[in-house]
Image (tube, helix red, strand yellow):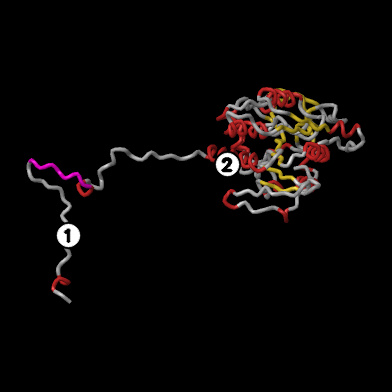
Amino acid sequence: MTPADHRPTQVLDTAPDTTPGTAPASTPHNTPRSTPRSTPERAFALSHLDALEAESVHVLREVAGEFERPVVLFSGGKDSLVMVHLALKAFHPAPVPFALLHVDTGHNFPEVLAHRDLVAERHGLRLHVASVPEFIGAGRLRERPDGLRNPLQTVPLLDAIGAHRFDAVFGGGRRDEDKARAKERVFSLRDEFGAWDPRRQRPELWNLYNGRHAPGEHVRVFPLSNWTELDVWQYIAREDIALPPIYYAHRREVFARDGMWLTAGSWGGPRAGERVEKRLVRYRTVGDMSCTGAVDSDAVSNADIVAEVAASRLTERGATRADDRLSEAAMEDRKREGYF
């Protein structure tokens, strides 16, 4: 070992030169660590609504790129209106490359149907309507004893999908609504009969979606899967999305049945002994009059509804949808038959 190996390590003097009249050298060593930078970094973070919007827009564009004939299930309700709003954003300034499809039970709220037609006309969207009453009139469906027509939507829906050769069908389902919806994929493969088989569903790691399907099969797509009811209402408030008036508190003639306020109508209500009364109510979700209940509410604005939903401990479907109360597996059964 040479003497040089025993020399002490040389320490560089990084202190600024303090000789009078001498300016400090412009090196990084002369800048104290505590000195703030002249151009501080700007923090940028997406809000949770921005993140949800970006995810949904990604799904919409993915479908446009993978499929030939997509369609949006559009009832004029809040979730389908949010989907259309997202589609308009996703493809602006180009037109939305999807048609709309509504399965009309014949018992839908007139206010909702009017809003459905208004939105389709305003944005130049093609609207296909599959009519349950037409299928009943043709003998392909039979009225149920309980008057519910929502469970009769499956045949008209699958018939319309086959007739128009739709290969991707957007739905407004969210995982927070129901146990059966909670385990649904964003891209949900359906067989040639429109049925859902949990063993054939594909993993969706890193937001990678697999839209492959055989002839005759199609894919149901749920861009709002990760949204909650509260997210939807906060987004509606932020984007100022117009909704049918029945979503806001209004006075309506209703009657009580199975813990819900149902609207009187030709569909079969009220029965003997069910008293009609006028109450201040609104609707959290919209199906048809035979199965959709109203809730007591004085919420007349989006801000009022956001506060009301934030305090609720019941899901919108669990609280106001009679068709989901037919059995604990009602939604699961409809998925296997081909509707949801």
Which quadrant, please, contains the C terminus? top right
Q: Report the front residue among 38 and 272.
A: 38
Q: SS at mark 2?
A: helix
Q: Residues within 10 Å of mark 1 (few under 14, many from 20)?
A: few
Q: Which residue is mark 2?
A: 55
Q: Which residues are magenta?
A: 21-27
- Image location (x, y in percent) of residue 313: 64, 41
Distance from disc 2 to disc 1, alpha carbons, whole Å, reads: 54 Å
Name the residue at 55% across, 30% down. Answer: 238
Q: Residues within 10 Å of mark 2 (few under 14, many from 20)?
A: some
Displayed quadrant of residue 79: top right
| Residue 307 visible in the snapshot | no
Q: Residue furthest left?
A: 20
- Image location (x, y in percent) of residue 223: 64, 41
As displayed, is residue 196 above or below residue 42?
Answer: below
* Mark closer to the chain start, 2 or 1: 1
| Dominant secondary structure (helix, strand or loop) of the stretch shown in magenta | loop
| Residue 155 visible in the snapshot | yes
Name the residue at 58% across, 30% down. Answer: 92
Q: Which residue is mark 1?
A: 11
Displayed quadrant of residue 262: top right
Give the amino acid at mark 2.
Answer: Glu
Q: Residue furthest right?
A: 139
